[in-house]
Amino acid sequence: MSSPVEPTTSAPGDDAAAAPCEDMPRVVLFDFDGTLADTAADLAAAVNRMRTEQGHEPLPLEKLRPFASAGARGLVHAAFGVNARAHS
């Protein structure tokens, strides 16, 4: 098992100044397609807010969930029937 990296002290401008700080995370993960965290409910809530602001009824999560990993284009298509390619 490896030991944790110890923070170093250095003078300003020294290359070692970029060493990790104890309070900073060592890794940041981005989960854009929902493979690590199930964010479909959050994305559906955002889409349904847009729908209600436009005077439409909210859609059930079950209808929007399949489009959650398709990004904004997929969700907007599911919510409003808009095809981004047709409007580009």
Image: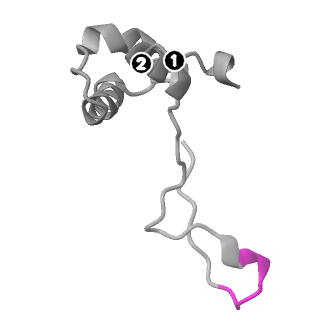
Q: What amino acid type is highlighted by mark number 1?
A: Val
The x, y position of residue 52, in whole percent, is 24, 31
Which secondary structure lies at badge 2?
A: helix
Q: Is residue 13 magenta?
A: yes
Where 28 falls versus 70 (above or below)?
Answer: below
Say which residue label 2 marks. Answer: 80
Q: Which quadrant: the C terminus?
A: top right
- Left or right for 30, reference 53: right
Q: Residues within 10 Å of mark 2 (few under 14, many from 20)?
A: few
Residue at 44% across, 26% down: 36
Asked if one can make out residue 87 in the rendered structure from this viewpoint, the answer is yes
Where 3 falls versus 63 (above or below)?
Answer: below
Asked if one can make out residue 38 in the rendered structure from this viewpoint, the answer is no
Q: What amino acid type is highlighted by mark number 2?
A: Phe
- Residue 60 is drawn in which quadrant? top left
Q: Residues within 10 Å of mark 1 (few under 14, many from 20)?
A: some
* Tag 1–tag 2 contact (CB < 8 Å): yes
Nearest to the observer: residue 33 or residue 19: 33
The x, y position of residue 67, in whole percent, is 45, 14
Q: Which quadrant: the N terminus?
A: top right
- Left or right for 83, reference 34: right
Furthest residue in direction front, as rendered = 55
The x, y position of residue 21, in whole percent, is 52, 70
Mark on residue 82?
1
- Residue 37 is drawn in which quadrant? top left
- Left or right for 80, reference 42: right
Which region of the structure is painted magenta? 10-16
Residue at 71% across, 90% down: 12
Q: CA distance from mark 1 to mark 2?
A: 5 Å
